[in-house]
Image (cartoon, rainbow, N blue to C red):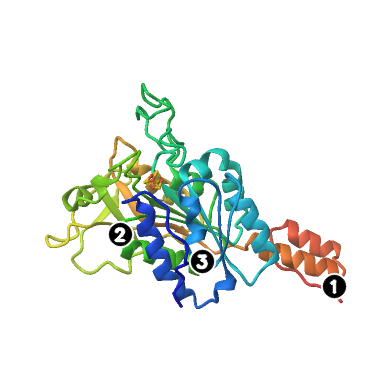
Amino acid sequence: KDFTSDQEVRWCPGCGDYAILAAVQGFLPELGLKRENIVFVSGIGCSSRFPYYLDTYGMHSIHGRAPAIATGLTATREDLSVWVVTGDGDALSIGGNHLIHALRRNVNLKILLFNNEIYGLTKGQYSPTSHVGQVTKSSPLGSLDRPFNPVSLALGAEATFVARTMDSDRQHLTAVLRAAAEHRGSALVEIYQNCPIFNDGVFDVLKDRTEAAARILHLTDGEEVAAGDTVVVRDDQGVMTVAPRAEADPTRIVVHDPAADDPSAAFALSRLDSPDLGHVPMGIFRNVARPTYDDSLREQIASARTGEVTDADIDALLAGRDTWTVRA
Ligand code: SF4
């Protein structure tokens, strides 16, 4: 099944959105779902034109509110695979509250956050991820705001799946999409995306082989590590030892446990890309199993409709159990 729609794509030539669209179109058949069982919901911004270009169901919705609309959809239609497409302005400024609450609730949504560190649709104002001092049309003397790190923000909200990838790395992007799709619960995928019109080259340093080798830390749970590989380690004082994986492969890798219940270690990893440290971790930071909001909601509704909820059931619910017995 080809999920390419018949709509003319209307992004600027060279926009990173094209590469992300191609990766998603190439990946969607892997889900093995009919088009009517896949929904893409977007907010407002360049990236939010995404649903037009997929032959699935979709909604180009309200600025910042895509997670809220998608929450209603996934809570009422268990049979759907629901995806949100948003940008750094849409998700982290006007939509900041909707995003963090969808993540903390663990709503079964896959949220693709295209981060180009600028407002593109409104022609080049600084966004919540623009760096301090960035000169834009709305910050002619340099932005004064400290930017959000979307991965840190998502981990702070205790999202159950958090990852970072890049528009130009089709293989890595597809692997992350695959892992997000397999995750049941909220998945936040930050995708570095080039805007050649208003913030061109902001991620070029990660696309140059030599520079990328010096900066990118490839996160792995250990399966890809072979004998003789050099890995990044942190000692008791938190000092990192960084070395190339091998002479022929300058990739630097960090072995960590994305399934760790406590997100603190993943959060510490997410802080390595501070301007002082200069490392950029890429890959899956967190992937833990937790009850989803929509599954728990359906169980409550079924219980209320078909049986009597006892005091013991309520005690169990308050104690954090996600299932309880329904008495006919
Ligand atoms: Fe892409 Fe930037 Fe053009 Fe928007 S303004 S379509 S992000 S290149």
Q: Reading the chain from its start, which is encountered first: label 3 or label 1?
A: 3
Indicate the amino acid at tag 1.
Answer: Thr
Q: Badge 1 local density, few (<14 within 10 Å), some, or many (20+)?
A: few
Q: Looking at the rendered structure, which numbered label has been put on residue 306?
A: 1
**Residue 107 coordinates in the image, percent (x, y):** 61, 58
User: In the rendered image, which residue does mark 2 sit on?
Assistant: 169
Q: Is residue 116 visible?
A: yes
Q: Quadrant of residue 2?
A: bottom left
Q: In this view, which residue lies farthest toward the top? A: 141
Which comes before the other along the chain, label 2 or label 1?
A: 2
Q: Is 215 on the left-hand or right-hand side of 263?
A: left
- Mark count: 3
Q: Amino acid at mark 2?
A: Asp
Residue carrying label 3: 183
Q: Secondary structure at mark 3?
A: loop
Residue that appears at 38% across and 42% down = 271
